[in-house]
Each structure stands twice: as C-alpha cells, then as structure tokens.
Image (cartoon, grey):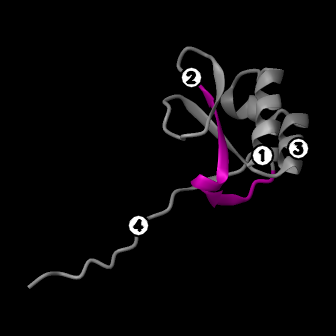
Amino acid sequence: MAQNNTSTKKIPVRRCVGCGEHFPKSELVRVLRTPDGEVVLDLTGKKSGRGAYICKAAECLKKARKSKRLDTSLECTIPTEVYDRMEEEISHG
C-alpha cells in the first residue's frame, strides 16, 4: 500500500541585518563575501562564502548602511558599488 507523504518542506528563515526581523530566505537579498575577499550580491543564494541578508525595504538598507551592520556581519568593508547595486535591486525587486 502506498504511503501518503504529507510532510511539509522546511522553509529556511534568515534575519535581516537592517531591521532584525526574520523572513523566509527567498524574500531577502544576500550579500556575500567570497573566499577570496570579494563582496558581491548573491541573488541565487547558492554561492559559497560568508553571507548576510537584508530585506527588500529601502529603510532597512539605509539603516544597515548607516550603522555598518553589513560590514560587521561580513567582517570587511562593503564597497559603495555594492550598496548602490543593492539599492537598485531593492527598488526594482
């Protein structure tokens, strides 16, 4: 007899560095420090390296930028171009 598999798939949850709220990983933008020290946006969420997440709210990005929360989380200085790219992604996303 076939078993009815009704187990639900676990949705990964991550914390936004801007507001501190928890969201499903798919609703956040991932900022990544690669093993060779480059800081990039990881829109797939699958690249290897140290990641930090921010929700798609302009206010959270402003907070995170002003308080350097991404710098602290990724243990490096975030280039201006990365913040600019995040602003672009958030305003279009």
Q: Work out whether mark 1 precedes mark 3 in sequence or the reverse, and give the earlier one.
A: 3
Q: Which x, y percent locates residue 4? A: 23, 82
Residue 28 falls within the magenta-colored stretch:
yes
User: What's under tag 1, amino acid-wise?
Assistant: His
Image mark for residue 63: 3
Residue 49 falls within the magenta-colored stretch:
no
Q: Are marks 2 and 4 in contact (CB under 8 Å)?
A: no
Residue drawn where x is 59% and y is 53% of the image: 26
Give me the C-alpha separation between circle 1 and circle 3: 19 Å
Quadrant position of residue 78? top right
Give me the C-alpha separation between circle 2 and circle 3: 23 Å
Give me the C-alpha separation between circle 1 and circle 4: 29 Å
Question: Is 80 rendered above or below residue 45?
Answer: above
Question: Which residue bears the numbered disc 2?
Answer: 34
Q: Residues within 10 Å of mark 4 (few under 14, many from 20)?
A: few
User: What's under tag 3, amino acid-wise?
Assistant: Lys
Question: Which residue bears the numbered disc 4?
Answer: 9
Question: Which residue bears the numbered disc 1?
Answer: 92
Residue drawn where x is 73% and y is 49% of the image: 93
Question: Is 43 rendered above or below residue 19?
Answer: above
Q: Secondary structure at mark 4?
A: loop
Q: Where are the magenta residues, as a range?
A: 19-33
